[in-house]
Amino acid sequence: MTVLALCGWILFLLLAFVLRSVMQYVTTGKTGFVGFHGRPLSLHWWGGALFVIATIGCPLACLLDLWGLLKRCLLLSSQPFVILALLAYGIGLLGTLWAQVAMGASWRIGVDLHAKTHLVTNGPFALVRNPIFSCMMVLAIGLSVLVPNLVSLLSVLALLVGLEIQVRLVEEPYLRSVHKDSYLDYAAKTGRFVPGLGKL
């Protein structure tokens, strides 16, 4: 399962970041990669930094498992959890890609404060305001169960905290400033990460 988890993470990175950036470049002339900003060690900076830590954490957890350097949580290694983990990975991957396609030219990695993108509210964005992040969490949980050691579980926690910071302190203020009442109306009806929860 460890090799499968590692291959799954590589596939996710290739499809959701590399291929999507290439598609964005072909369509718009820009990769869509903005990155994260903020004064080092500030909350804004930690939003992006924790995302990077989580991204590194998954392959690190796999390598540590292959080398036998970390104990596994035996409960999560049982067959029912493995099956659920594989389902979570598949749903998370397909959901992420669907949400990225739904964003069209508005897709970005990070926030460009000087750009005004179209407010996307259709497709998966009609269910939640941040479907890419929601699906990424589902995928990450699935992968962590396939390699259930301390590093993989801490990576999921880092991703969760990083996404909360990024959405609440960076993306939502930006969207409010750019789209004003349109975003507020949308956010009042649509949950942040889970349908019905986190409405503004």
Image (cartoon, grey):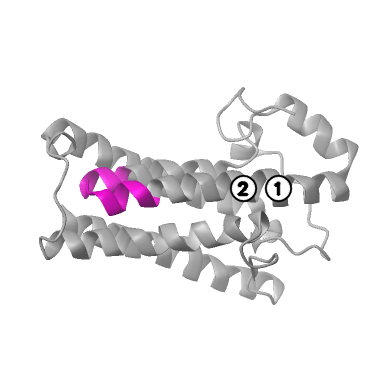
- Identify which residue, 59 or 158, lies in the foreground: 158
Quadrant location of the C terminus in the rendered image: top right
Left or right? Give the position of 61 relative to 125. left
The secondary element bearing badge 1 is classed as helix
The secondary element bearing badge 2 is classed as helix
The spot of residue 156 in percent (x, y) is: 39, 47
Please tell me in which quadrant of the rendered image residue 73 appears: top left
Residue in the image at 75% along x and 64% along y: 112
| Residue contact between numbered discs 2 and 1, judged by CB atoms under 8 Å | yes
The spot of residue 54 in percent (x, y) is: 42, 57
Residue in the image at 81% along x and 38% along y: 183
Q: Residues within 10 Å of mark 1 (few under 14, many from 20)?
A: some
Q: Tell me if I can see residue 146 in this picture.
A: yes
Identity, as a three-letter code, of the amino acid under mark 2: Ile
Residue in the image at 12% along x and 35% along y: 79
Q: Which mark is residue 169?
A: 1
Identity, as a three-letter code, of the amino acid under mark 1: Leu
Extreme-top residue of the structure: 196
- Identify which residue, 164 or 126, lies in the foreground: 164
Q: Which mark is residue 165?
A: 2
Left or right? Give the position of 29 relative to 148. right
Let me know if residue 146 is in the magenta part. yes
